[in-house]
Image (tube, rainbow, N blue to C red):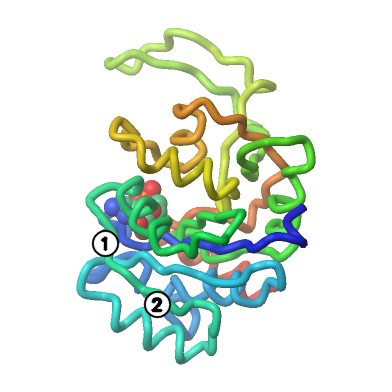
């Protein structure tokens, strides 16, 4: 399905990334020879199914984003705009810039620099069963407990039913547009939660450990190792 239709990507990069302890926003910390955001933008730019890319960056960083795009020659990333107070606000701002004829919108966290091309293929290929959205998911190896405020165990969850989810997440454009426009869209930590809230169906495909999210310095070092090994 995705081969025949227009696919646009929105890269959300407007978070501060305080836990990284850097003096500028997480998306612009050094990753190899470039700012962190460059790695995922390059991967999306290289994918033949993607027509265009919208970058949502911290207010005041639009010009830096444009320099980065020129530097790496990512010709599909022609729009850089400021984000909002929450991830959902940033997604809404990005989605508003996607041309009306896009049928599928892929949303990606700049905090995940590594996007293997076959992960994009799997996500775009997952619409076959009539889903409104497709997200990459990984099984959980550890045992998972629910705890109370004091840290006492309340319950042990059935991990066979649980997944950790990643980005890029893909959605039918009209479904995502409606979900982000909902006045009570909330502050979900991913886009699928907005679509679920709006009554949409979301399918999962197998994720990839390389699409890990950078939160701490140790994550950054680990992702740089994986990047070098690629
Ligand atoms: O904070 P966290 O790492 O969960 O953010 C996930 C992604 O959402 C990051 O790429 C971050 O830059 C982005 N984000 C955003 N606007 C915000 C908050 C987060 O674009 N207000």
Q: Which of 55 and 23 is in front in this view?
A: 55
How far apart marks 1 and 2 lie (CA) works out to: 13 Å
- Picture layout, residue 163 above or below residue 175: above
| Rendered residue at 50%/60% (across/down) | 100
- Residue placed under numbered mark 2 in the picture: 30
| Rendered residue at 55%/55% (across/down) | 105
| Rendered residue at 36%/79% (across/down) | 65
- Picture layout, residue 209 above or below residue 161: below
**Dot 1 surroundings within 10 Å: few (below 14), some, or many (20 or more)?**
few
Residue 216 appearing in the image? no
Q: In which quarter of the image is residue 103?
A: bottom right
Q: Nearer the viewer, residue 3 or 113?
A: 3
State the SS at label 2. Answer: strand
| Rendered residue at 45%/90% (across/down) | 70
Q: Which of 210 and 147 is in front in this view?
A: 210
Marker count (numbered): 2
| Residue 5: image tag | none
Where the C terminus falls, by quadrant?
Answer: bottom right
State the SS at label 1. Answer: loop
Residue 80 appearing in the image? yes
Would the CB of label 2 be found within 8 Å of ligand 1?
A: no
As drawn, is 76 to the left or to the right of 60? right
- Residue placed under numbered mark 1 in the picture: 21
Q: In which quarter of the image is residue 102?
A: bottom right
Q: Nearer the viewer, residue 217 or 27?
A: 27
- Picture layout, residue 87 above or below residue 226: above
As drawn, is 220 to the left or to the right of 15? right
């Amino acid at each position: 399905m995705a081969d025949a239709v227009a696919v646009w990507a929105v890269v959300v990069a407007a978070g501060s990334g305080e836990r990284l302890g850097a003096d500028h926003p997480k998306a612009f910390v050094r990753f190899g020879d470039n700012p962190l955001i460059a790695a995922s933008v390059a991967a999306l730019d290289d994918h033949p199914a993607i027509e265009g890319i919208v970058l949502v960056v911290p207010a005041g960083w639009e010009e830096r984003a444009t320099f980065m795009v020129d530097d790496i020659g990512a010709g599909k990333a022609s729009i850089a705009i400021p984000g909002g107070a929450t991830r959902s606000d940033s997604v809404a701002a990005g989605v508003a810039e996607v041309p009306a004829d896009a049928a599928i919108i892929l949303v990606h966290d700049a905090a995940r620099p590594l996007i293997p091309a076959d992960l994009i293929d799997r996500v775009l290929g997952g619409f076959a069963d009539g889903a409104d959205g497709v997200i990459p998911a990984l099984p959980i190896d550890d045992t998972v407990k629910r705890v109370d405020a004091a840290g006492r165990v309340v319950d042990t969850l059935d991990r066979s039913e649980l997944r950790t989810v990643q980005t890029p997440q893909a959605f039918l454009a009209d479904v995502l547009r409606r979900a982000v426009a909902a006045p009570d869209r909330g502050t979900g930590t991913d886009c699928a939660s907005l679509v679920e809230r709006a009554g949409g169906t979301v399918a999962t495909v197998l994720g990839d450990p390389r699409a890990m999210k950078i939160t701490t310095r140790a994550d950054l070092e680990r992702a740089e190792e994986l990047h070098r090994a690629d």
